[in-house]
Amino acid sequence: MTTSKRIAFLGLGVMGAPMAGHLARAGHRVTVYNRTGARAEAWVERHEGLDVHLAPTPAEAATGQDVVLTCVGNDNDLTEVVLGERGVLVAMTPGTLFVDHTTVSPATARSIATAAVERGLLALDAPVSGGQAGAENGKLAIMCGGSAEAMEAARPVIESYAARIVHVGEAGAGQATKAVNQICIAGVLGGLSEGLRFAQAADLDLDKVLEAISGGAAQSWQMVNRWKTMADDEFDFGFAIDWMRKDLAIALAEAKAHGLDLPLTSQVDSFYAQVQAMGGARQDTSALVRHLPKATA
């Protein structure tokens, strides 16, 4: 049985809110902070009856906690929440644990880890994969960068919402692995989009096509979970294109820093830009198919 801990969770978006909920239902004392205060208030109301609390600033959320977790928007958001004048690091007690689930650049992750270690803290960069459904079902995959000691301290906590937890290396390695994850997803969705449009143009039974090819080498999570919704033009769920483009920008910048060209990823990113221009910025990443017009004959 997991020992109850005092936990602060900062960032209650489509990923963070259910993750924090899993922690509360696991018996932890959870204090939440969100930049939009109304969202945090609503989260506390939804979890009435559990040991949940609200804090007005990141520092107050982090005060007196065993573990502080963040899941915010981007590098700037994370830097402000963690390293700002009212950020979490100034309030954390030496020996306690900081875990970040935001997808940011490896450089930002390493900078925060250095600042945390200088204050006597344990730190882990731990971006997640699995989307909104994975967060809600407690089945996320988490790739972690940091010390073995930080990993050991974090695992019993993050098991509350993860199905797979892998320690991939030192600080920043989790974020670099998340870049690999997004590169691979971009390529898969590019191929899946073209395959679907081909099947439609050939006037094939799309359900039968899925049944046939999802049992072979072409099978992927995206195919199994998104083929039908893509065919039905349903995209108002899941991981938004705006966030995917943010992640791909990190991957492309990191690749450039290593002298590496990623032509396929760059091409898919440009297709996402087209879908954004079509009004799809907040649609699921599977809306990539929208950049390909349907055959008219």
Image (spheres, rainbow, N blue to C red):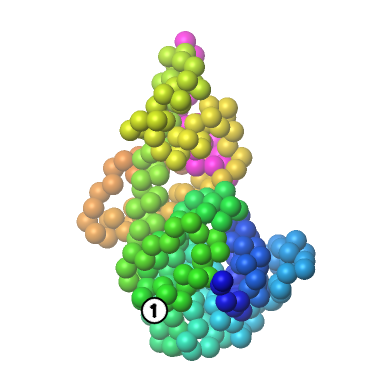
Q: State the image coordinates of residue 255 (x, y, percent, origin top left).
A: 29, 55
Answer above or below: position of 265 versus 30: above
For residue 41, what is the image quadrant? bottom right
Answer above or below: position of 188 versus 82: above
Secondary structure at badge 1 equals helix
Q: Mark 1 points at which residue?
A: 149
Please report the residue visible at 40 percent of the width from the left and 66 percent of the height from the top: 144
Horizontal side of 224 relative to 23 (left or right) equals left
Please report the residue visible at 65 percent of the width from the left and 71 percent of the height from the top: 27
Q: Which of 159 and 91 is in front in this view?
A: 159
Answer above or below: position of 85 versus 268: below
In the rendered structure, which segment of residues is drawn in magenta? 278-297
Observer able to see residue 159: yes
Please report the residue visible at 66 percent of the width from the left and 75 percent of the height from the top: 29
Horizontal side of 61 relative to 177 (left or right) equals right
Please report the residue visible at 43 percent of the width from the left and 68 percent of the height from the top: 125
Q: Quadrant of the N terminus?
A: bottom right
Q: Crowdedness of circle 1 by 10 Å Cα count: few (<14), some, many (20+)?
A: few
Q: Nearer the viewer, residue 53 or 239?
A: 53
Residue 71 is inside the magenta segment: no
Q: Which residue lies furthest to the top in this view?
A: 297
Q: What residue type is labelled 1?
A: Glu
For residue 62, what is the image quadrant? bottom right
Observer able to see residue 105: no
